[in-house]
Image (cartoon, rainbow, N blue to C red):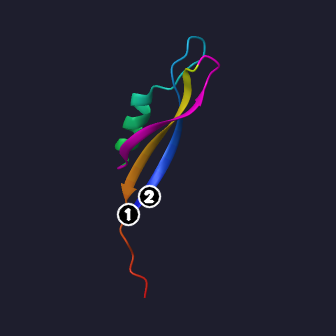
Amino acid sequence: MYRYLFVECKVGGLWGKSNNHRDEIEKYVVQGWRFVSAIPKSSGSYGQIDFVDLVFEKEEEESLEI
């Protein structure tokens, strides 16, 4: 079974500060998460992507319930 984590990340912009997506991915990978995908979350008035959700997964041990 897998557990999923969604991390919001601001992407490029001329005037706004953006998160470095590579730094964000590295931060979670060293904690044992596997990067799966980046899903566009919102866009600006000219169609540019403003935010993405970085998707990570981690395998969990299944516990046997009796």
| Crowd around label 1: few <14 · some 14–19 · many ≥20 (10 Å) | few
What label sits on residue 3 in the rendered view? 2
Question: Closer to the camera, 20 or 44?
Answer: 44
Magenta span of residues: 32-46
Amino acid under label 1? Glu
Instruction: Give the main secondary structure of the magenta stretch.
Output: strand
Identify the secondary structure beneath mark 1: loop
**Camera-nearest residue between 48 and 9:** 48
Residue 37: say if magenta. Answer: yes
Q: State which tag comes first along the sequence, 2 or 1.
A: 2
- Do tag 2 and tag 1 residues touch (Cβ < 8 Å)? yes
| Residue beneath disc 1 | 60
Residue at 37% over, 48% down = 33
Q: CA distance from mark 2 to mark 1?
A: 7 Å
Q: Position of residue 62 (x, y in %)?
A: 37, 72
Q: Residue at x 48, y 49 (%)?
A: 5
Residue kind at label 2, given as amino acid type: Arg
